Image: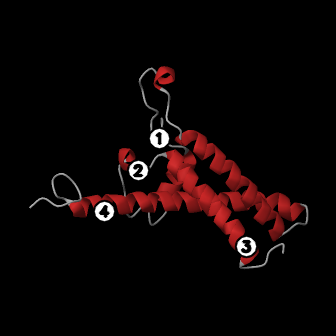
Amino acid sequence: MVGAGTPDGNTGDARATLARKLIDAVQYAVAVTVVAAVVSAVPSVLLGAGLVGVKYGLFVLGFLAFGYASFLLQPVKPWKSGGHRRDREAGEPTPFRRFVRRLPPAAWFPIEPEERFGREVKLLLASVVMLAVSYVMEVVFGVGV
């Protein structure tokens, strides 16, 4: 009997692939958020702003990343692309992407490059995580209130 997951009925493989894609994307989003927090922390500490500067840094970088990811998510117009679509992860992966993929848990669940979410989806997810961390810092932990 053919299942509802895939044309050949292999729902277990489809779920496993989706889980691996989500692990890869969430790990990338968390890694980008950590880097953004560290980048925000350096000038914040040097200027004496402390965690308030990190909160604002994550907020600003999160909105910038959201805008850039939204731009990347727009479809390529056929008359501008010559009929070709953009690559999901064009060219070789950056050193940062290679580093993130070597970290657990993504290293434990390898996934083929063509099966991963595109960089635009990962960046959009990272921007949402940055904005969420900034929000939690303010509302839950009272940073800068």
Q: Which residue is mark 1?
A: 89
State yes or no: discs 2 and 1 in contact (Cβ < 8 Å).
yes
Q: Is residue 99 left or right of residue 50?
A: left
Q: Earlier in the sequence, mark 4 or mark 1?
A: 4
Element marked by disc 2 = loop
Q: Which residue is mark 4?
A: 16
Q: Mark 3 is on which residue type?
A: Met
| Residue 137 numbered tag | 3
- The span from disc 3 to disc 1 (Cα, nearest Å) is 32 Å
| Three-letter code for the amino acid on which mark 2 is drawn | Arg
> Looking at the image, is mark 3 or mark 4 nearer the viewer?
3
Question: In x, y percent, where is residue 140?
Answer: 71, 79
The amino acid marked with disc number 1 is Glu
Q: What residue do we see at 55% from left, 46% from top?
A: 95
Q: Is residue 2 shown above or below 86?
A: below
Please give the name of the residue rendered at 77% of the width and 58% of the height, measured from the top-left corner: 57
Distance CA(mark 4)–CA(mark 1) = 21 Å
Sequence-wise, which precedes: disc 3 or disc 1? Answer: 1
User: The residue tagged with tag 3: helix, strand or loop?
Assistant: helix
* Spot occupied by residue 141 in the image (x, y as percentages of width and height): 74, 79
Disc 4 to disc 1: CB gap under 8 Å: no
Task: Please tell me which residue lies in front, 101 or 3.
Answer: 3
Amino acid type of the residue that numbered disc 4 sits on in the rendered structure: Ala
Which residue occupies 71% across, 62% down?
A: 37
Determine contact: label 3, label 1, CB under 8 Å: no
> In the figure, 101 relative to 45: above or below?
above
Residue 130 position by quadrant: bottom right
Circle 1 crowding by C-alpha within 10 Å: few under 14, some 14–19, many from 20: some
